[in-house]
Amino acid sequence: MEPQALNELKEKIAEVIDVVHAISVLEWDQQTYMPPLGGEARAEQIATLSKIAHEMFTSPQVGKLIHELEPYFQGQSPDSDDAAFFRKVKREYEKDTKLSPDLVSRISRTTSLARDKWVEARKESNFSLFAPYLSQIVDLMIEKAESLGYQESIYDALVDDYEPGMKTSRIKAIFEELREGLVPIVRGIKESGVEIRRDFLSRKFDLDRQFQFTLKILEKMGYDFQRGRQDKTAHPFTVSFSVNDVRVTNRFKDTLLTSSIFSALHEGGHALYDQGIPEKFDRTLLMRGASYGVHESQSRTWENLVGRSLAFWTYWFAILKEFFPQELHDVSLEEFYRAVNFVEPSPIRVEADEVTYNLHTLLRFELEVGLIERKIKVEELPGLWNSKMKEYIGYEPKNDAEGVLQDVHWSDGYFGYFPSYTIGNLFSVQFFRKALEDIPDLYEQFARGEYSPLREWMRKKIHVHGGKYFPEELVQMVCGEPLDPQPFLNYLREKYRGIYGNL
Amino acid sequence: MEPQALNELKEKIAEVIDVVHAISVLEWDQQTYMPPLGGEARAEQIATLSKIAHEMFTSPQVGKLIHELEPYFQGQSPDSDDAAFFRKVKREYEKDTKLSPDLVSRISRTTSLARDKWVEARKESNFSLFAPYLSQIVDLMIEKAESLGYQESIYDALVDDYEPGMKTSRIKAIFEELREGLVPIVRGIKESGVEIRRDFLSRKFDLDRQFQFTLKILEKMGYDFQRGRQDKTAHPFTVSFSVNDVRVTNRFKDTLLTSSIFSALHEGGHALYDQGIPEKFDRTLLMRGASYGVHESQSRTWENLVGRSLAFWTYWFAILKEFFPQELHDVSLEEFYRAVNFVEPSPIRVEADEVTYNLHTLLRFELEVGLIERKIKVEELPGLWNSKMKEYIGYEPKNDAEGVLQDVHWSDGYFGYFPSYTIGNLFSVQFFRKALEDIPDLYEQFARGEYSPLREWMRKKIHVHGGKYFPEELVQMVCGEPLDPQPFLNYLREKYRGIYGNL
């Protein structure tokens, strides 16, 4: 029989999660429908609920329940849902109680000011406007990391929020291996001299038809509209208010057809993960997935491994042409496929192709580690950014807006997040390769518009566990191997050989 | 100088209101965009936040601050904003501390689930599906009323949430006077033999054009879209998350053109009130208006006194014809005006004409009082509803959907609310008569599409006070008289004499 303290702890945590989800609804509304002057009151509402959630979670009562339950769980199998729940609660509680309310509130106040300054600085493409705020944030992140504690690298303490258990040294090694593999691929593509036609991508595509097309894709992927919906926003995201209410957002510009399509696939991938988590985990800390990296593996699977495959477009291109008969009348399937897989050195991470993408995150990782280890000064960032861009990607940013000011993460205090993007890319190929072993005709299925075998495989192997395991435990369980960049590099070589010839 | 305790009390209350507004956002989302299966988690979120808001507001700390401030406010003018704020906080605190957190959360959870059941029951026109939930709600309402306490009638305790200071006995007397006046008017109209053409009202009107037309009306009324927006819902309502974020909702059916138009005027009237409340009252208990009845007076002013006047259509009918040239090609202004003022016994309150409307609320008032006084059982409701409908209005509902299941209120636990609709109708004419004294050419202005003088009069006389006064104090201040059904009856007689001849 479950001890009473466990029921109490579950109820407490469920209520914390209710508050956190209420914050998510407020944020979703802010990014989709809120009228222009609603922002000030919304900021107060979010600040108040954040304070309440933090106070509820770090309350002495939660600490007492954890303490009471320790002996009980020492006698339980560590694989049970309850044990995983308890581990997760204990871990988060110990982390959160190490941060003083004063530090939490200073971080919140500083980042909320910094965000506005970042918007302004980016608009004016002037890093010096943002620099003093970023300096404060770096100091706060160091204070946070020192409060949390670490064994090897101070940056470990920050990464842990996004990739539980992951170490800086391991990320460094992975990036090193990845970079070594990527350099010759990028060079090979550059030297191939292959020309790819892309003129038709920037023709005018009706916004409403784009919206309808993305709905069709989401539906076919198996995104459940009884438990979700798609709305318009400025910067697409997915948000879960419960496993039965997982919403995607998308952005529509008439000259950016493929942006809305790949966003739908990307956010749809996140959403399938959140919708695929068993209902029993709802209102627990296990409903979130294993890590930001594992989450990203799901979005990248659908965006890239599925959505940028020739098999995918073998099915969809004819439908797309029905939506845009005039706009695509002179384009062949093969041309379209090549256009959406065009590789080039470019300044903006979120618009980068599959090949160069991880060099963008590598650059950010190196700069973040340098800042947090106090080896780099904030004032040096623009110069370092630009020289690393030139070195890794072969592109020189024209200004701060397309360089060091492009990402919102630092202004929000999200230090330690960027590695998850690359970890997600690597996981995605590791999982997909395993899925291909189990379902050898996956690509034939894609060519017929069939995704349920892939989706159900992901559900059974990954989604079903919710947040029970650390990311590297999960990849070990599913693939029988640790995080590894080689499958990703092999995937790139094979795929881009088909487009650019011998690499 | 303000005592420190006052600042502390204001900050505490502001945070409570942040939580209450978060609940409102969750509810707005539930009624506009939430996917079908999101309801269960949403009910939990709302229940948790309701509990938190209640705990925060009824905390001993708030009690202590109120106690500390008593002597200070005995020396202050009772008319100051701070004094009104303090009175309101003290009054609500004394009421709310009588309700246990457990009761509050049971009400919230039960009503949240009951709402979905009500939707289902109404769709199937089957009261028995909803009855068990309604029984629970009635029990909870009685528990609530008993906890709050009362002097004369148990129903007083519930009415007070909507009309502070109003007594059941007074409502009974007002309804009696009103009914006596209405009976001969209804009879006169029935016996007049006047035929009113209405065929064109149920032609097909494009939904998107309806939406655009209602936006045009809202804009012209002076509704501020920088601080609000219109969305689609099943049952139109207005909600305020701050004086700078006041949203209206509307419903569009192709054969119900006038429904969306009058809803826009109605909700627009509520919204002008909420947008007209001074920003200084934001995040205080004074930002809500004087009562539900006073709020309804504003919506009914725009819906009926303005929107169903010949002067209003003198301006708008030509524009409406531009939106629907084909659909209205054979209709004259006079015919349209008469059609939107057609009086007949009909089943649905929200679609009832101005004359019979208050007989619908009377019926509900009597049933509610009976339920709360345990003189009526839930199972008896459909039968009682239908026999009262026949007696008061001369219409026999064909089924539960157009009878006892038509209103959402009971499923939401809004017992004591219905009288406010009638009080609002009476107030609206009292206020409007006064406005006409101050601005004699109001109708000439309407015929030119000018509303700012009326809007600014309402703002100066009513909105500016927020929730500082009791409803009957306010009508006394503005009109120099108490709540009175006679002006309303006189308005009806005069107006409908113009349409139906001598009454």
Image: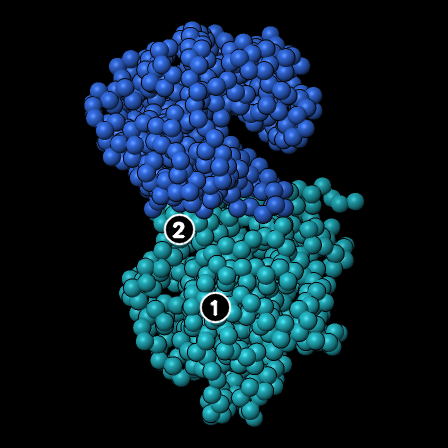
Chain colours: A blue, B cyan
Residue A442 locus on image (x, y percent): 24, 27
The residue depicted at 45 percent of the width and 57 percent of the height is: B233
Q: Residue under mark 1: which chain is it in?
A: B
> Is residue B41 at all visible to an observer of this figure?
no
- Residue at point 45% right, 76% down? B200
- The residue at the point 36 percent across, 67 percent down is B405
Which residue sits at x=39%, y=33%? A331
The picture places residue B184, in percent across and down from the top left corner, at: 51, 90
The residue carrying mark 1 is: B257
Image coords of residue A143 (percent x, y): 59, 17
- For disc 1, the neighbor class at 10 Å (few under 14, some 14 to 19, many from 20) is many
Q: What amino acid type should be assigned to the residue bearing mark 1? A: Leu
* Nearest to the observer: residue A492 or residue B91: A492
Residue A17 vertical position relative to residue B137 in the rendered view, above or below: above
Which residue corresponds to mark 2? Answer: B109
B370 relative position to B295: left or right: left
Question: Mark number for residue B502?
Answer: none
Q: Secondary structure at mark 1?
A: helix
Quadrant containing the C terminus of chain A is top left
Name the amino acid type tagged 2. Answer: Arg
Q: Quadrant of the N terminus of chain A?
A: top left
Q: Nearer the viewer, residue B471 or B258?
A: B258
